[in-house]
Amino acid sequence: MELSPKQQAIELVKKSQNILLITHKNPDGDALGSILALHKSLEILGKNVIAITCGQVAESFKFLPNLASLEKQANVNNDFIISLNTSRVQVEKLGYKQKPDENKMHIVITAKDGRFTQEDVFFEKAKTQFDLIIVLDSPDLERLGDFYDENTEIFYEVPLVNIDHHSSNDYFGKINWVDLAATSTCEILVALLEALGGGNQLFTEDVATLLLTGIITDTGSFQNSTTTPKSLTVAAQLVAFGGRQQEIIINLFKTKSLSTLKLWGRILSKIQNEDRLKFVWTTATKNDLEESAANYTEIGGVIDELIKSIPGIDFVLVISERNSSIHGSLRAVRKNIDVSAIASLFGGGGHSQAAAFEIKDNRGVNEVAPEIISRIRTFQRNRLQI
Ligand SMILES: [Mn+2]
């Protein structure tokens, strides 16, 4: 009988010893909760683990246990190996001579009885130390950021398990444990940790807190329409294991820095209402970020906590300026609208209730936004048939 992706993933993790974990750049609560919980659990199981995240971690996540174990880089073995066939002739001695004026180095091999020929020499690239890569909460490989760009080969050489819940997932793994019914990657990991620990053994208070963080962020603390009975059951189980629900709520929902409040004030003051077309939108410029001493990780909350509460609209959009690109964040306000279809107009994706896109463009948001809005107006006109 063919094993399910879940069973295959469990078997592969069990037999692997050197594991690389990675999640999408600029990680959210689900990305951080899942990578840190799995890191801790695999260490308890005696594995060598390296956990990578690129980009920025928002200030509000600083309370997460083991956050310091995250790395931006890992030593991937890039050695170039020169090999010699010794089946015929043995090596007596090995040395090298630098020839800097000729930009050369001579490797001198002295044979014991006989001589080596060109046919005895061949070249290999060193094998990486990792025997398994697990990608968490990322719909594709590009979203992993710099680490993927700089070490692309290992993602094709080493067996890869892709664990995710995004409907836009590309199925890039050798094993794809993609569960669209799960609210979060953390929810999927509960099943993995049960299988690996043979029961509840891996659910320490810290691991439970990390997994609960992912479920709480991706369900908007159980306020989103995507909240399922399963997510509530799993959350209850994690609280019973000592998951610190209040600590998560206080840090993620009830603490706002002065910079965040100043930034939100600027973003809220610019809200545009597309009355007949049932959406609202606003922008965040680099200047808004500088003037409020905020960074772009502080933009997200303003949509989920404030703009989404405007009555009578289908969706909201916040367009922000990044280094040399324009970023759009979309949230559905009503359940029967699929904002990932709007994100895909601009090459983005996500879920029906939350989606995003990124456009490479050096012009500022004030120049690009009217073009974006005009395409969305057409989309809504067709959808609403007005
Ligand atoms: Mn997620």
Image: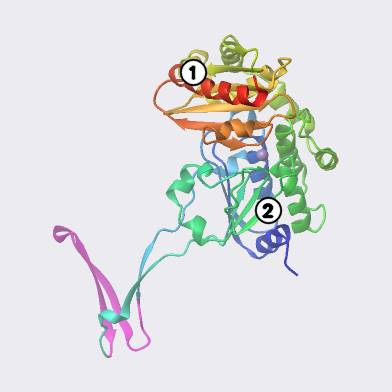
Q: Which element carries disc 2, helix, strand or loop?
A: strand
- At x 51%, y 55%, the residue is 155
Quadrant of the snapshot with the N terminus: bottom right
**Magenta segment boundaries in residue numbering:** 84-113
Compared with 118, 334 (above or below) is above
Compared with 62, 43 (above or below) is below
Q: Is residue 27 visible?
A: no
* Quadrant of res 45: bottom right
Badges 1 and 2: C-beta atoms under 8 Å apart?
Answer: no
Amino acid bearing label 1: Pro
Mark 1 Cβ and ligand 1 under 8 Å apart: no
Could you tell whether 139 is left or right of 254 in the image? left
How far from the left and from the top, in percent, is residue 92? 30, 83
> Which mark, by number, is residue 370?
1
Ligand 1 quadrant in view:
top right
Amino acid bearing label 2: Trp
What secondary structure do most residues of the magenta stretch adopt? strand
How is the structure coloured here?
A: rainbow
Residue 198 among magenta residues: no
Counting the numbered discs, the total is 2
* Quadrant of res 184: top right
Spatial CA span between label 1 and label 2: 40 Å
How far from the left and from the top, in percent, is residue 90? 34, 85
> Which mark, by number, is residue 177?
2
Residue 107 among magenta residues: yes
- At x 70%, y 34%, the residue is 218
How far from the left and from the top, in percent, is residue 219? 74, 33
How far from the left and from the top, in percent, is residue 356? 58, 32
Q: Earlier in the sequence, mark 1 or mark 2?
A: 2
Towards the viewer: 183 or 117 = 183
